[in-house]
Amino acid sequence: MKAIETISGWGGWPRRTCRISVPVDPFHVADALTGASAIARGLGRAYGDSALNPDCTVLTRRLDRLLAFDAESGALVAESGVSLARMIEVLLPRGFFLPVVPGTKFVTFGGAIASDVHGNNHHVAGSFGNHILWLDLLTVDGDVRRCSPGSDVSLFQATLGGMGLTGIVLRAAIRLLPIESGWIRQRTIVAPDLNTAIDVFEANLASTYSVAWIDCLARGPARGRSLVYLGEHASQADLPPDIAAHPFATARRSARRFPAYAPSWIMNQWSVRAFNHAYFQKGCRQPSDRLIDWDRYFFPLDSILEWNRIYGRPGFAQYQCALPLVAARDALTDILDVTASSGLGSFLSVLKRFGPGVSDRPLSFPIEGYTLALDFSLSPAALTMMDRLDEITIAAGGRIYLAKDSRMTQRTFEAGYGTGRAALSAAILRSASNRSFASLQSRRLGI
């Protein structure tokens, strides 16, 4: 099926008219490629233009089958267009969970591979690609190559985090995590400022999961005040009798859809400041230790479908940077000061601790240290401020997350990822023929 559609990423900007192909099975993906270049697109949750190509954007949503599962080894084989939500729905009752999940379950298997997504457990489990056993990749010359940590290694590593530029993932195998229940033992620690929040992360590196909501508009002694959430998969022994009888039967949330685009003036410094104050005070009053089901712990925003509409029709940009450990405190302080001074605060502000990254994945995002994610309504003032945040990030030796990016420059990209790494990735994806896999993002960044 082929059509012309105007589409965007999750941030709603930029919007482009693209030639769309929707192959019905893996055997017809090569036939779906039209024009000199193409890019794959899953459920459209990349925030910017990394899954947009006006020549040919290949939707993988019909490649959505779970193909095989070995309960003894925990190995799952699936097509690239299946959602993480579907994978969890099928495998959780069998006592397995995905080893790494991002902040939404509404992404595809292939999209998680292409972005090498990270979760709240990167400091102990690494990123999504660490758990991929092998993948089948449709390359520029039309061949399907199976690559793995032990075979066609350079292509395998370049594909993990490669933003779809090495080819289209058709199917892959991943090793799942065995669990005893669908519940998380959550501990909330109130951090009155940024330094305390970082100290909490460093003191709890043995915790499986850790993530913080951070107040990006608090100033003075309260700068960076946070609610740090630690988590562990609950065992049978952790559950009260009524839950232990059905440990995977967590309550199903009824997702509500944000009805329409909100007026752009709703997202202002006063509304965000009021929300942040109320959210922090609510967190201070909640029990510090409680059981919470997997859906609420990992995917709190998934209960509101189309929540991106809250930013209005102009759209929004997420600014997510990774900062090396040695420079993180100072750089985070500067970023929060610039954000607070601008008055363009974000109510979706998240801080995580990264463990070591994987150096031979050219475009993979994580580096050991901290990652901060901030959402901003799009405006000239916001774009100017994010340019200033780029300067702070690059000066600290950090980088910007490609899966969230919609506006960084080629200079910022090369400073963060290195021209050598970009050249390595480009050599792999363009060496076979004059056809390429490319996106508006890759063209903007010169990858």
Image (cartoon, grey):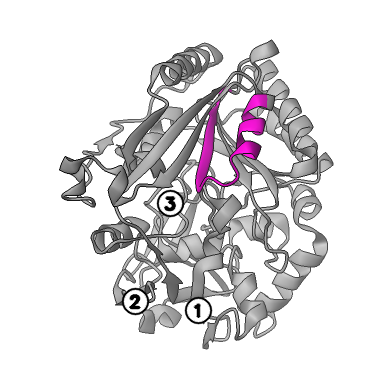
Q: Secondary structure at mark 1?
A: strand
The label on residue 6 is: 3
Mark pair 1, 3: CA separation: 34 Å
Look at discs 2 and 3 and give the one toward the viewer: 2
Using the rendered image of the protein, determine whether residue 411 is visible from the camera's viewpoint: yes
Look at discs 1 and 3 and give the one toward the viewer: 1
Dot 2 amino acid type: Glu
Residue at 31% x, 58% y is 88
Viewer-closest of 253 and 204: 204
Does the magenta run of residues contain 420? no
Viewer-closest of 268 and 295: 295
Look at discs 2 and 1 and give the one toward the viewer: 2
On screen, residue 427 above or below 188: below
Residue at 58% x, 61% y is 439
Residue at 36% x, 69% y is 22
Dot 3 amino acid type: Thr
Can you identify the residue that label 1 sits on?
Answer: 134
Residue at 31% x, 74% y is 71
On screen, residue 355 above or below 185: below
Can you identify the residue that label 2 sits on?
Answer: 72
Give left or right: position of 342 versus 74.
Answer: right
What span is colored magenta in the figure?
196-215
Q: Secondary structure at mark 2?
A: loop
Does the magenta run of residues contain 203? yes
In percent of width and height, residue 133 lies at: 50, 76
In percent of width and height, residue 249 lies at: 19, 49
Mark pair 2, 1: CA separation: 18 Å
Q: Secondary structure at mark 3?
A: strand
Dot 1 amino acid type: Trp
On screen, residue 333 above or below 104: above
Using the rendered image of the protein, determine whether residue 219 is visible from the camera's viewpoint: no
